[in-house]
Amino acid sequence: MHEPDNLTNSSNDPVVIIGAGIVGMSCALSLQRAGRAVVVVDHRPPGHGASFGHAGGIAVTWVSPQGLPGLIKRLPGWLIDPLGPVAVRWPYLPRLVPWFLHLRRHSDSAGVRRIGDALASLMTHAWPAWARMLQDVGGGLQELVRHDGALTVYRERSRLDDDRLVWDMRRERGFAVEIVDDEDLRSREPSLATDFTVGVFEPQAKWCEDPMAVMEGIWARMVVNGGSLVSAEASGFRTDGDRVRSIQTSSGAIDVGEVVIAAGAWSHRQAAYLGQRLPLESERGYHVDIPVPGIELRQILSLAPHKMVATPMRSGIRLSGTAEFAGIDSKPDYRRARALVDHARRALPGLKFADASEWAGNRPILPDSLPVIGRDPRFRNVVHAYGHSHIGFTLGPVTGDLVASMITGQGPVVDLEPFRVDRFSRRGAYSGAR
């Protein structure tokens, strides 16, 4: 195992967590459960990054990477369409070339299956960690999680066949996958347009009707438990030998016992202060919230042709999706949000769009689709926890538990070798497909 022994400080030393998204806040709760004092540092309120605007899925069946065999061949066609499911802003393309080369190396069949096994090792513990967190937080948050499954729909059977590897990977790892043909499809989702002819139902999938309410509940519980939030931007570290002694922030220095980097799409900047160079990119997604949709959805609905999701929320219906690579500091292009509306009009003919609102946010994605979870190889009191791509909401609580187990010396229940922070630069380290 990669994790060094005997690294814990006194239980009175604070653990400082950089990032107040679902991963960072889950780390805070798990550490408090283990008896550690925590401080969270973020210049935004808890949950106001990617944790605010995602599709709400607790996607415990998601064990396939973004980079699948044949993806590179599809990319040019997607990129030609400025409002297609994947977009790259052309001035940013030269900076992306190394990232896409990494993606290609991780996209052969053998590498994809190794990555699937690594993701499955996390997913095994994902829902139990969620259930434990919801129970700890209380306040009726359990009622916000729906267990009605997920339905992915296709217009042609041939397109379903194109995704056979995805569905086979889920079956092989113990998840139920049910093919739904035309007539049954309509009974499962009456609002769906008739040109969709086949689908896949996943009964084990879940979703949250109000992700922001969950984030607010976690924040409130963290404060009740004695935790604090520093509203500031982290800008560096003061180190002494193999330890970090303090974090530099826009509000001054904060002394630390342990550090957890969980800053989502900004995490590579924090890691770089410690000498770690990662191919972590910001993949911008968009959503449209529709408060009076005029229809009801019976489950979370994925429109496979457009790589987008329609989720029944407590506040209406949320359309979410797209993957835009433009650099984390670029401004959103809300034409991509309006493209979601155009696709939804065709797929759900009865959907109304009055008073709809748009949002954009940045997901942290690595080319092998695996998060970074583990101790820093150089600084003994630093733990990395980021890069969860589309499944940060799903894996937040289990990541929190794994981080707490490392910091308290209990040892993680998952083999963390595939998630090493140095796997892209260390000779002989796990790196997916070779």
Image (cartoon, rainbow, N blue to C red):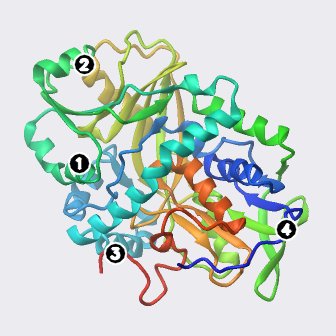
Name the residue that disc number 1 marks.
171
Percent position (x, y) of residue 339? Answer: 36, 34
At label 2, the amino acid type is: Arg
Q: Circle 2: is it few (<14), some (14-19), or many (20+) Cα within 10 Å?
A: some
Percent position (x, y) of residue 331? Answer: 56, 49
Identify which residue is drawn at 31% across, 71% down: 106
- Which of the pair 95/240 is nearer the observer? 240
Residue 189 appears anywhere in the view? yes
Q: Earlier in the sequence, mark 3 or mark 1?
A: 3
Residue 333 appears anywhere in the view? no
**Up-down relation of residue 264 to residue 6 (above or below):** above
Residue 101: assigned label: 3
Which tag is nearer the camera, tag 1 or tag 4? 1
- Separation of marks 3 and 2 at Cα, in angstroms: 41 Å
Percent position (x, y) of residue 48? Answer: 66, 41
Which tag is nearer the camera, tag 2 or tag 1? 1
Residue 256: assigned label: 4
- Which of the pair 140/285 is nearer the observer? 140
- Separation of marks 2 and 1 at Cα, in angstroms: 21 Å
Q: Secondary structure at mark 1?
A: helix
Which tag is nearer the camera, tag 3 or tag 1? 1
- Separation of marks 3 and 4 at Cα, in angstroms: 38 Å
Are circles 3 and 2 on residues that touch, CB within 8 Å? no
